[in-house]
Image: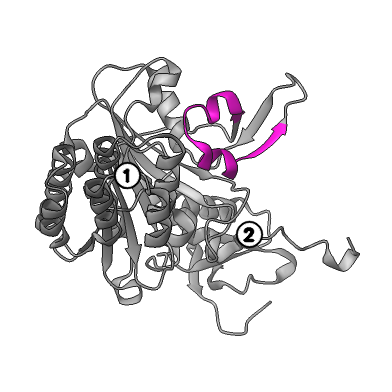
Amino acid sequence: MASNERWLLPDGIDELLPERAASVEALRRALLDECARWGYRYVIPPLVEFTDSLLVGLGADLDVLTCKFADRNSGRMLGVRADMTPQVARIDAHALGEAGVTRLCYTGSTLHSTSQSTSAGRSPIQLGAELYGCADISADLEVIDLMLALMARASNEERSGPITLDVGHVGVYQAVIRHSGIDGDAANAIFDALQRKSLPDLDEAATTSSAEAMSALRALVNLHGGPEVLQQARICLASVPEALVALDEVEQVIQSVQAVHPSVSVYVDLAELRGFQYHTGLVFAAYLEGVGTAVATGGRYDNVGAVFGRSRPATGFAFDLKALMATARAVMGAGALVSAPDLKDAELLEAVRKLRAAGRSVVTALGGTHDPRCKELLVKGDDGWMIQPLNPGENQ
């Protein structure tokens, strides 16, 4: 690499400069504090793990996204986390091993081998919350409520516009597939066609299916839109009782969101099977106007902990903190920065200590030059050191 190109970063990898880094950090702290108020305890999973535990039982999607390398100490393969949710599931199942309901929250950098979309980078900062030990839909409603509360706390509605919640349920697809008796390669091809909402590919993948099964599968492609889609779905899937049970859960989510978050728009998509193929029930995503990808995604993923020795009901969500920060309110500073003379004066040092303890930011004027961000300065008066305005353009 030429010397004038050494500053280049890999495609999809970015760095946060001071102002943006401060915004992300302030938002991170605010959201974690809010999670704590809801009873969620903070955990910090490791950046890398053995792929044997990082990827086991989680499907091919996550495997492809994970950057891997050999561990020189053990000779085993290590992976840099692409998603922190499986790590938190391991903590719940193995490290904690608690009975009853466990609520955990977390944040940290992740790394993707490829970008998930044209607008997304490869190094999201993930922040999320997970609830374990409750199979009832009340757990799903709680995490959705928390997710929307965090978005309302962070978002600047004047910039971002309204929040849209996209709701689906993988149980609808699973029920139709089971009812149709489709499995193996045919089921995989149908899954792929539904993800792309491609009717021609779906017809080709389901050529051996019955007319009833084909009708239900084709209906899934078009079952998306406002809450009224549920009524249409009940008609199209009337012959699949398990699918109707899943639709009841989607309806409960819609009713809850409309009651608690009336300003949030709800979009239903019954062919949305997002995630890393480990979701087992409700799936959801939150969108902000002007942001091309989902700001938050989540859903139910029961029994992932089974590979770690404990099968537990689980549901949760995760934000891309960088995407959320793009529409967040401006960071509230701790007041104007104060410039302090570069003197080893005991009274001055005590005054600086007290100001910093009170939350003020004090910057030493090294070489007699004030930091350009400072709006005030410490000067010595008859009663000791005091703050006064720093005149514009004053550098000495």
Q: Where is residue 137 in the image (x, y as percent from the top left)?
A: 17, 37
- Helix or strand or loop: what does disc 2 sit on? loop
Q: Residue 209 carries which label?
A: 1
Q: In which quarter of the image is residue 293?
A: bottom left
Residue at 51 percent of width and 59 percent of height: 22
Q: Which amino acid does label 1 sit on?
A: Ser
Q: In this view, does 271 lie to the left or right of 66?
A: left
Q: Which amino acid does label 2 sit on?
A: Gly
Q: Is residue 291 left or right of residue 170?
A: right
Q: Position of residue 155 (x, y in %)?
A: 33, 64
* Quarter the N terminus occupies: bottom right
Q: Is residue 137 magenta?
A: no
Residue in the foreground of this view, choosing between 151 and 248: 248
Name the front one of labels 1 and 2.
1
- Helix or strand or loop: what does disc 1 sit on? loop
Residue in the foreground of this view, choosing between 231 and 327: 231
Q: Which mark is residue 12?
A: 2
Q: Is residue 67 magenta?
A: yes
Q: Is residue 199 left or right of residue 83?
A: left
Residue at 55 percent of width and 82 percent of height: 391
